[in-house]
Every structure is written in C-alpha cells, then in structure tokens.
Amino acid sequence: MAILTEVKQKEWQAAVNYVTEVYETVKKRNPGESEFHQAVKEIFDSLVPVFAKHPKYMEQSILERISEPERMITFRVPWVDDQGKPQVNRGFRVQFNSAIGPYKGGLRFHPSVNASIIRFLGFEQIFKNSLTGQPIGGGKGGSDFDPKGKSESEIMKFTQSFMTELAKHIGPDLDVPAGDIGVGAREIGYMFGQYKRLRGAHEAGVLTGKGIGYGGSLARTEATGFGTVYFVEEMLKDQGLSFNGSTVVVSGSGNVSIYAIQKATQLGAKVVACSDSNGYIYDKNGINLDTVKRLKEVERKRISEYVTEHPEARYVEGCSGIWTIPCDIALPCATQNEINEINAKVLVANGVKAVGEGANMPSSLEAIEVFLNNKVLFAPAKAANAGGVAVSALEMAQNSMRLAWTFEEVDAKLHEIMVNIYKNSVKAAEEYGFPGNLVVGANIAGFLKVADNMIAQGVV
Ligand code: NDP
C-alpha cells in the first residue's frame, strides 16, 4: 500500500490498535446492535490511514466521541385503532452529532425499526451530511409502526401522536427530520400539521420533504433517486462508460427506486426489474414506470399487480432473486443488507460493471469485498444517496429566505453537489493511498470535516 511508504509501520499499527479498541468498546456498550456494529466497522476500518497520518485525532479521542450519540430519545407512541382499541408503538430519535449544523435525518416507520437500526442510520448520516458540503449535523428517527394495511385515519392518528412527543425535541435550528422508509409526503404533511398546532407557529424549516404548497422544495421528491444516478454517471464517465444502452436492475419500488428508474431511463438505460418487500417483477423490454408509479405512489398496492396490466412481464415471489437477473448496473434502493455475499458473487458472475447504493447500507460488508475484489465500480450509500438530504438542506435554505427556487435550479444544484461528492471522495481515496476505493474515500472525506469541527469546538 502506498501509504506505508509515507508513514512508519509503527504509526500504522498504532492506528489499527486504536480503531480495534474503540470498536470493541462500541460493541460492548451497544450489545446486540448488529446493524450499528456493521456501520461502525465499515467506517472505522477505512479511517486507519487518517489516524496513521494524523495522530491528533487519536489524541483527541475522536472515535470514542463520534460513535456515542449526543442524545438518544425513545418514547411511547399511544394511539387508538379503527376498532377503538388502544395501540402502543415505540418512537426513536437519535441526535448523533451537531458539529457542523442542526441534526438532520429522516424518520422511518417500519416494523423492523429498533435502536440498532436507528443508531446505524444516524451514525451514517453524520458522514453523509458532511459530504454534501451543507451545514447539517447527523440524526435519524422513526418507529416500529407498520403503515401497511392501516387506514388513512389510523395513519393520521399515529403520526399525530408520534409528533406530539417528537415536537419537544426538534426545531428549525435544532433538529430537522424528513422522510425515509414508510414516511412520504402524506406522513410529513400530518406531522407538520401537528407540529404547527402544538407550537402555534408556522415554522416551515422544522421538517423537510414538505408539500410544495407549504414550504416544500421542488425536486426534493426526486432528489435521492436522481442523485444516486448522477453519482453513478460520474463514476461510469471516469471509466469511459455510461447509462446509455445499459441494462439496469433497481430494487424496491419506493421513493428512491422510482426516481432512480426515471433518471436512468432518461439517460438511455433499460431498467428491467424492480421489487417490493414481497417479490420482484422482470420485464425484459424495460419496465413501465407510469404503472409502477400509479401502483405504488397512488394506489399503494403490491408490485405483483404490475403483471396483470403487463402480461409480458414476470412476477417472482421473494426479493433476493432480483440479483440473479443479468445487468450492467445494479442499483439497490430498498433496504439494508439486501445484497449478501452470494448475491454479490452472482452479480459479478453475470458481468455487473457498476453498483450504486440508493438505499442505506444495502450491501453487507462481505458483499462490498466481493465487488471491490472483482473491480466492480462501487458507489457507497453515504456518497451515492446523499442527494436526498442535500436537497433537504436546500429546502431549509429556501425556508429561511422565504423564497422558492424552480425545479431546474434545484436539480442543477443537486447535480453539482453529487459531482462534488464524487470528486471529493476520489481525491480523498487517492490522497490516503486507496485510489479508486470510494468506500474509503467517502468515509475519509466525510469524517475529516466533522472531526476538525469537533476539535475546534472543544470537548462537548
Ligand atoms: P419507501 O418506503 O418509499 O420505499 C421502500 C421500498 O423498499 C419499498 O418498495 C419497500 O417495499 C421496499 N422494502 C422495504 N423494506 C424491505 C425489505 N425488508 N425487503 C425488501 N424490500 C423492502 O422508502 P425510500 O425509498 O424512501 O427508502 C429506501 C431506502 O433508501 C432506505 O434504505 C432509505 O433509508 C434510503 N434513503 C432514502 C432517502 C429518501 O430521501 N427517501 C434518502 C437516503 C436514503 P414495500 O412497498 O413492500 O414496503
């Protein structure tokens, strides 16, 4: 490794020892939180070259400080279902790091939500937000509430109850939540209404992903999916490749997936498959996005319904089979750990050239190894899906200035941000001895800004 020529072996070993020790402490302090451990391990391991070169971060106990949230709030969310029966869910908000701005990160409503999931997402968010170049700290939240099968009135009652407690902990200069899995424009609308009622003021900047009529930003809905494709486009361009004429597989059929499909198609790709948590559809001629949008965004139905309108397509029960479909570019946009080592090996055997993570941590650590070892171009989530939160920060800026930019203005800024994230990640990877490794590059670039500002603000 090139870095070994610059720093002494002793310093490298000291950095490895430091990272290992702090990782063990994190595991002990957060027992059983496997997703959080996984996210921490990925980041810690890639920071070894930083500590070897700059021991000041070890002297300042930066890893110990950055891996412990500033605040972790859990709360009861009581609500009454349509049968009149009281129900209880658990709510979470982790306020992880505010070194460079107010806490910022989405809310996830899904039965799998627990402290580990929230902590992993919040931890990742620190570095992702830093990479955007916007002044936003890291946070995340959500609930184990399952929106599937709930009536409109139950969704409203739950989200209002959730916000009744959350409102005590957030604010436009303090903590600004947004959507994530299970939280879209409808839920943000109900939560904003409840917050406004509780505060007695129209504080537009308290949430992002709002409706356009009450302070939302144009292009926020599209931002994560578009941003992922913009990032992958840059990565392909560097190797003389492009979306044009390529075959693409996108998992999920939610917010991120739909707009990744739209942008990839606009750039000339053929997207042949997408999925939901029950199964996937394969349409060799390219999937019809209008049908997917109507089924998922309007009618809130299962993706299996697609084949009744498009009999030429095929529906297969179960999600992971989607990765057996041969493709040039894979865009996992559903959820964490949806690509394991075996899925990754099959993708490689089928000739995948690039993988762009639209979802958070969709590839296991072993799967990432497979991609990197086989020279697959790999765009890690922290960098590739940062477009959503970047446009959320632009929404906050518009709210503060009390003005609204056009779709084209926001989209152009998003594009520029994604190109910059790509360039900064490439540069950091090269500078620290891992050319072409965007996992290392993104983690280092995101870390340095936060760490330096933590040091500047003293031990707080
Ligand atoms: P949505 O709720 O809009 O969509 C999620 C999609 O993934 C749905 O199609 C859902 O299927 C599917 N899905 C959910 N859980 C599973 C599972 N366990 N196995 C297989 N499929 C599953 O969420 P988003 O599109 O907003 O989020 C998707 C990912 O992108 C998440 O990892 C999120 O953290 C990440 N992300 C989102 C951002 C945003 O701006 N929205 C920003 C950055 C990252 P079903 O319809 O059956 O539920």
Image: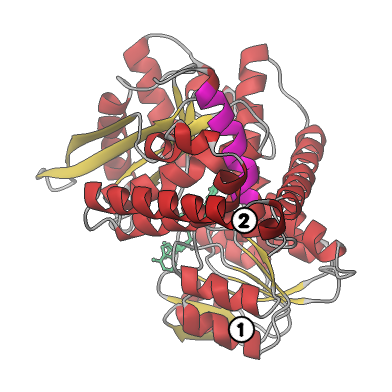
Q: How many callouts does the rendering have?
A: 2
Q: Quick one: 76 or 192, which is closer to the camera?
A: 76
**Where residue 10 appears, x then y in whole percent?**
54, 54
**Where residue 15 appears, x then y in whole percent?**
50, 50
Q: Work out whether residue 389 can be spotted.
A: no
Quarter placement of the C terminus? top left
User: Which quarter of the picture shows residue 293?
Assistant: bottom right
What label sits on residue 440 in the rendered view?
Answer: 2
Residue at the disc numbered 1: 347
What residue is rendered at 25% in x and 49% in y? Answer: 30
Relative to 235, say whether 371 is above or below. below
Q: Quick one: 238 or 43, which is closer to the camera?
A: 43
Q: Identify residue type, mark 2.
A: Val
Q: Work out whether residue 84 can be spotted.
A: yes
**Where residue 146 appears, x then y in whole percent?**
29, 54
Q: Secondary structure at mark 1?
A: helix
Q: Quick one: 403 or 27, which is closer to the camera?
A: 27
Classify residue 294 as left or right of residue 118: right
Would you say residue 25 sits in the magenta stretch?
no
- The local crowd at label 2, few if under 14, some if 14 to 19, many if 20 or more residues have their Cα within 10 Å, is many
What residue is rendered at 38% in x and 22% in y? Answer: 170
Q: Identify residue type, mark 1.
A: Leu
Q: Secondary structure at mark 2?
A: helix
What residue is rendered at 47% in x and 55% in y? Answer: 16
**Where residue 14 appears, x then y in whole percent?**
48, 50
What's the magenta bit mostly, secondary-structure-wise?
helix
Residue bounds of the magenta highlight:
442-455
